[in-house]
Image (cartoon, rainbow, N blue to C red):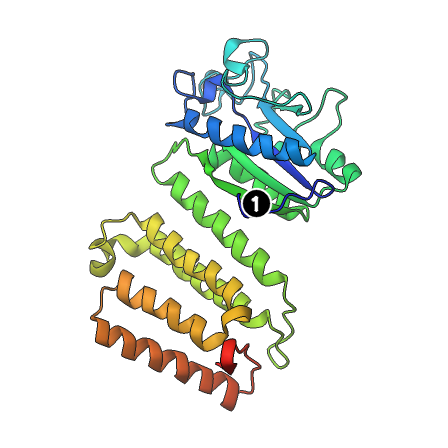
Amino acid sequence: MTSVRIEPEQDALLVVDMQNDFCPGGSLAVPRGDEVVSILNTVMQKFETAGAPIFATRDWHLEKTKHFKIYGGVWPSHCIQGTKGAEFHPALRLPSSAEVISKGMDPEEDAYSAFQARDAEEMQLPIILGIRGIQRLFVGGLATDYCVKATVLDAVHQGFQAVVLEDAIRAVDLNPGDGEKTALVLLALGVIWEAQKLPVGTPHNPGPGFLPLLLAIALGMFGIVVVAFGGNSGPLSSLGWGEGRHAIAILGACVFAAMALERFGYRLTILLILVVLFGVVERKRPLLVGALSLALSLGSFYLFYNLLRVQLPRGPFGF
């Protein structure tokens, strides 16, 4: 967040459900959920200083709703209108300019996404953002695997750029690993978003975004396979990571590739990724790592560029 320039005419901050019931001691507490309060306070201060809009969502349920377990849902009662649990965390310093939008008032719906929330005049968030010309949303809050995920997916679906504040989210993990798998989804969205900034073209006439997108899809699929089956792999298990973290590490390389190809060139980018995959994940010997990485980097470049005539990006010094 420190390196991102806030554009008040097109950026907005979305603080998701930082309410007492979702923090330690609440009826649906997210483990370590209160840790993100100070981080969000810092981010809100930056947005307020820049003059950019800040929205704070809240669950605002009726006492009787199918969202709750006692009425057929999956969750314990939480964030009931007018209760202490529905209030924002006492340490959350919402600026006076922040706008509170509410969701979950309909007893027949779950309403996880902030895009289902309304302001005091019953105007839905997408309409508010459209009126103000907002294009990029910074999202943080609770919980990663439900309301944050639903909000980010809706944002991307409706054409917004979504920036997830990774240090300002926490997962409820109703099912073990939900948080890691959600982080995998959000990283994949980041890869696709970066890749789409470059013209893709066609297989016969590829643009500069063709290869990053192809790489994103391939590594993304591999990451999903790792989530499902990677626990049985000897080299992966030796790292002591969960399957989700393996996949996140692989998609992290994918994010790097999408952003680095035009800056560093194809050969150097692929070389660096292969060194990480062979050296860190697979734990190969340094000499073997160097030889395999260099051979695959140069060999694949020759195949694509010289034989198949695919226009690949070149980095510094023409490499």
137 sits left or right of 300 in the view: right
Q: How many marks?
A: 1
Residue 290 rendering spot, x and y as whole percentages: 28, 76
Q: Identify whether 182 is placed above or below 146.
A: below
Residue at position x 56%, y 87% in the image: 309
238 sits left or right of 200 in the view: left
Residue at which label 1 appears? 163
Residue at position x 28%, y 61% in the image: 280
Residue 80 rendering spot, x and y as whole percentages: 55, 13
Q: Is residue 116 visible?
A: no
Q: Quadrant of residue 173?
A: top left
Residue 172 rendering spot, x and y as whole percentages: 41, 30
Residue at position x 59%, y 56% in the image: 193
Is disc 1 surrounded by few (<14), some (14 to 19) or many (20+) residues within 10 Å? Answer: some
Looking at the picture, tell me which residue is in the foreground, 107 or 168. Answer: 168
Which SS class for mark 1?
Answer: strand
Extreme residue in the bottom direction? 307
Q: Identify whether 257 is placed above or below 133.
A: below
Residue at position x 50%, y 15% in the image: 90
Extreme residue in the top direction? 83
In the image, what residue type sits under mark 1? Val
Looking at the picture, tell me which residue is in the foreground, 165 or 51. Answer: 51
Q: Identify whether 188 is placed above or below 273.
A: above
316 sits left or right of 8 in the view: left
Residue 188 rendering spot, x and y as whole percentages: 49, 54
Q: Is residue 155 visible?
A: yes
